[in-house]
Image: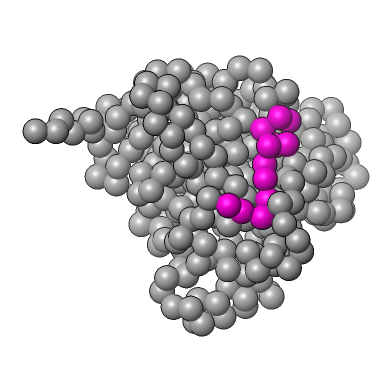
Amino acid sequence: MTTNPFVAKSPVPQLAKDNLHLVCGSGGSRAILASAGAIYALHKAGFDNWKTMGGISGGSLPSLLLASGEKPGDMVRLAIDIDFSSMLTRRTNVFMTFMAFLLKERLAQSRPRKAVLGSEKLRDFLDGRVKEWPEKYWTMAVAGRTQIVFTAKGVFQYLHDGTMRQLSDKPAPLGDAVRASCAIPGIIEPVLWTNPRNGEGIYLFDGALSWDGQCPIGVVVRDFGAKPNDVVGCDVGDRHFGGFSGFISKFWRFFCGQGCVWPDDETDPAFWAAQGSLVVYPELNKFNSLQFTLSAEQKWDAVIESYNATVLRLWKIGRIDNAKFQELSHLGRNPQLFKLECANG
């Protein structure tokens, strides 16, 4: 008789008490910029002492930098200054790249081990900037139908029914964990992670492919013991994106059927918002999440739009008063002043 390696779920050990949990969702370049803007708004509103900070895909990067001690204003400046496309290496020609982007919903189902972009430069950048796994940071990727959660306490594998097994009691290489969370099937290469306990290799893909969808608030509620009203989420997923990209997505779903559809969010952020979570939905509709070459003006517009959306949300739910709302809104209406403030950290 084979022993089932999965045991009744035990939460990952909690860290500090009486603090909020930050969850930054997926969305490529839009998620990076939206999360940076939201984090800066939260900082200006006095939310700085987090219990955990984490995210998936594009949202895994700003949350990592924040957890590593980066000042929110410096993080915004870094997001503006870095050429996102320089973090990726093209593996094929322009036509094949276009086809992969067109077929990305089909590829999300088949999950090929080859892709049109490599992310080793992203790993090297992160490993060079963040030397140790931050105590409060987490990110998540998927392997098959399971979630692989990476933390400072080790690597954990979760099934849909909530059971868990610990794959490693040591943190995975930081850059590879983030790369795995960003590995959009067919677009960005998956990461082969080797379990140090048994030498088993596991191919890891985009964290947005799990049952928690594009802003996985459920991870911190179920696995870290968070209460819904202690969670702040930033959701800028592609389902909010319109225009030509939205048309292409709808057309392709109609053309190739149900096999192209991304997995439905069984626990959509709106569900957690109804339970008391603070969820921000920045509407960044001027460029696609997989558009990695952006001008500084486009980036500043996205950051400030997310900042303003976060400030408005904080005021609407009563987390800041009228005077603070007016102060923070004034900053968001004045781009030059906003840039100067960010320069001060």
Query: 204 or 36: nearer the eye?
Result: 204
The image quadrant of residue 158 is top left
Q: Is residue 34 above or below residue 169?
A: below
Q: Position of residue 42 (x, y in %)?
A: 64, 37
Residue 334 shows up from this direction: no
Q: Does residue 119 show up magenta in the picture?
A: yes
Q: Does residue 148 show up magenta in the picture?
A: no
Q: In the figure, is residue 239 to the left or right of 285?
A: left
Query: 170 or 309: nearer the eye?
Result: 170
Q: In the figure, is residue 237 to the left or right of 17?
A: right
Q: In the figure, is residue 101 to the left or right of 254?
A: right
Residue drawn at (47%, 26%), measured in percent from left and top?
A: 151
Q: Is residue 276 above or below residue 220?
A: below
Where are the magenta residues, as a range?
114-125
Q: Position of residue 93 (x, y in %)?
A: 75, 61
Residue drawn at (73%, 36%), measured in percent from left and top?
A: 121
Q: How is the image coloured?
A: one colour
